[in-house]
Amino acid sequence: MRNYFYYDILDNTMREYNFLKELCEEPLCVRAGAQNEGLGRANHIWLSPSGGLWFTFDYENNRSLPSFALYLGFCIHQCLQSLFEPLQGKLQIKWTNDIIFSNRKLGGILCNYQPAKRTYIAGIGLNTNNEIDAELGKFGAISLKDILGFEVSNDELCRLIIKSVEDNCRFMENKKTYIDYCNAHLFGKGRFALLEMGGINIEAEIIEIDSNGALSIRNEKGELIAMHTGSILQFLD
């Protein structure tokens, strides 16, 4: 049985999760109404104003999967599309860890694996009922409330996303299933972009996600490169 903890405000849910996990052996979920110091990839700040869905939860798995963030993207994408008809056909997955609606960021994923505990720790941030102010707007964000025209239950959506991760676990043994799904909904597929890879910026065409979860790109010389870490900085077309 998973224990759910909610706070009106936290520095960040992952820090509180780590504290509570020392006191509790059962699976946990820590959710905050707002975060003062939300974390994104590479220790970037994740703006987490009141009204959004910000939570950290754990998932036990016997081995580390390089493509686990994509598995989470698959589960979140499926969950949101099944719940909200206006998202269908417009919701995409940006390698490696963002959920995109009509070219604007709806949410993001942060995860790490703890081998000693055989557990993934996942942080999820979704713009649900929060206002998209000027600060968030400059990152190209959009909220579910703006798309749907009404507010959603953050508590219920949090639980349904975790349920999707748990219920779809059979696909983790056959990662082709969720990799194919991510490719079918891949943001930027076939477009030329400026990408950051290992601290170096390169221009390349986005081809697909390969079977190991790497982004397959084609550089200006026509060479195929497997991009295992890095970011899509901007599109050039």
Image: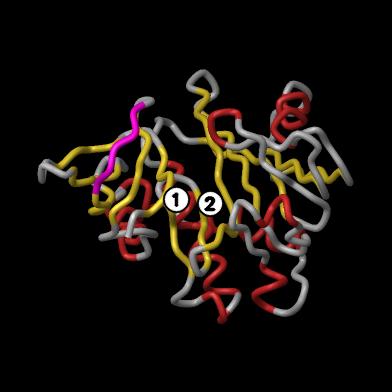
Q: Quadrant of the C terminus?
A: bottom left
Name the quadrant containing residue 47.
top right
Vertical comparison of 18 with 175: above or below: above
Colouring method of the image:
secondary structure
Vertical comparison of 209 with 79: above or below: above
Q: Amino acid at mark 1?
A: Cys
> Which residue lies at the image location 52% right of the left edge and 30% below the top edge?
112
> Which residue lies at the image location 44% right of the left edge and 76% below the top edge?
89
Image location of residue 121, percent across then percent down? 58, 34
CB atoms of marks 2 and 1 within 8 Å: yes
From mark 2 to mark 1, how far is it between C-alphas? Answer: 5 Å
User: With 230 as the anchor, is 218 left or right in this view?
Assistant: left
Q: Which mark is residue 166?
A: 2
User: With 190 as the anchor, is 148 left or right in this view?
Assistant: right
The segment highlighted magenta reads: 200-204
Image location of residue 175, percent across then percent down? 31, 49
What secondary structure is found at the residue carrying circle 2?
helix
Magenta stretch contains residue 102: no
Q: Amino acid at mark 2?
A: Glu
Q: Residue lying farthest left?
A: 222
Q: Around disc 1, counting alpha carbons within 10 Å, would you say few (fewer than 14), some (14 to 19), or many (20 or more)?
A: some
The overriding secondary structure of the stretch rendered in magenta is: strand
What secondary structure is found at the residue carrying circle 1?
helix
Query: Which residue is labeled 1 in the image?
Result: 169
Q: Around disc 2, counting alpha carbons within 10 Å, would you say few (fewer than 14), some (14 to 19), or many (20 or more)?
A: few
> Which residue lies at the image location 62% right of the left edge and 41% below the top edge?
123
Q: Residue lying farthest top?
A: 116
